[in-house]
Image (cartoon, rainbow, N blue to C red):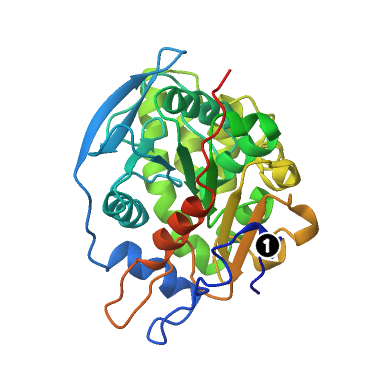
Amino acid sequence: MLFSTPLSADPTAPNYPPYRAPWWLPGGHLQTLYPALFLRRRFAPFRRQRWELDDGDFVDVDWTMGDRDAPLVVLFHGLEGSARGHYAGSLMRQVVALGWRGAVVHFRGCSGEPNRLARAYHSGDSAEIEQLLRRFRADNDRLYAVGVSLGGNALLKWLGEHGADARRIVTASAAVSTPFDLMSAGRSLDRGLNRVLYTRHFLRTLKQKAREKLARFPGLANPAALARVATLHDFDQLYTAPVHGYKDADDYWRRASSKPWLSRIAVPTLVINACNDPFMPATALPTPAQLSTQVTAEFSATGGHAGFVSGSFPGHLDWLPARILAFFRAHGQGGENPS
């Protein structure tokens, strides 16, 4: 399935080639795992800056070098991601090649150092997105935001919540491999081969971080129960939901999902998902009727989760960042000053 909604909203779409996976990389799992585990990564030089947050915590931001007056592309990574991720490296290299500036925001606890508070980060934390984007916007006239996976869900939720007001902060945005419906995505990840390939990997670091939190904040959760956690639902039930103000995992998955907010987005936004994404069932992808007229949706048949490898073997990751930046250049008018 490939559709753009509406086609006329994105002048880059008619002449931009849709994504197709190379013949030598078949299936959603290979298209997800190959770039993450085997494809050689190349990174733009970064410098790190620590930002103090309003609640006494911090996040670390990795910046590319460049002209301070150039457009800025900010990336929000996925679950347990960082600036060292394959999609971060490929996007930031093309941002620099374009003569723009880039910044990768590390969610709390994802930059290699534990954050200070009991809370961490989560899929629905649009308030965190708001705080950070306003800070970026204060020094940048043309600000573009990209979210991948968890970061894409939080970004889209923020865009929908703020409607036309978001245009005062960001010029355009993009979301990649978004789990629009967290209930569907969570159930998919907690079953069968997905649970072995992906959930086990995520839980390895999530549980380690939670154990460190329990050592610093006794009573936050039951350590014995944490040791028994074997699914993302278990983890969100024990830690994510109660620590971040949700009743339980199901309440978190319902209220943090971006899908109900997509119809309210007023910023030009590109959403890219693959129908064979192991994390997000194609049946749970939003329909054209659920999208605002400002949303251009490109749902390719192949690509996996945040994969989108192109070219002859061993392949490259140029298609995705090139598509995103073409969209941004086509929607490059400066926004209003923030209030």
In the picture, the quarter occupied by the N terminus is bottom right
Q: Which is nearer the eye, 84 or 14? A: 14
Residues packed near mark 1 inside 10 Å, few (<14), some (14 to 19) or many (20 plus): few
In the picture, the quarter occupied by the C terminus is top right
Q: Position of residue 3 (x, y in %)?
A: 67, 69
Task: Decide if residue 12 is on the left or right side of residue 215.
Answer: right
Task: Decide if residue 165 is on the left or right side of residue 192.
Answer: right
On screen, residue 15 above or below 76:
below
Residue at the spot 35% in from the left edge and 40% down from the top edge: 104
Confirm whether residue 231 shows in the render: no
Task: Decide if residue 164 is on the left or right side of residue 104.
Answer: right
Q: Which is nearer the eye, 162 or 177? A: 162
Name of the residue lying farthest toward the right: 289
On screen, residue 193 above or below 230:
below
Residue at the spot 41% in from the left edge and 67% down from the top edge: 319
Residue behind mark 1:
8
> Disc count in the image?
1
Q: Which is nearer the eye, 288 or 148? A: 288
Q: Position of residue 16 (x, y in %)?
A: 50, 70
SS for callout 1: helix
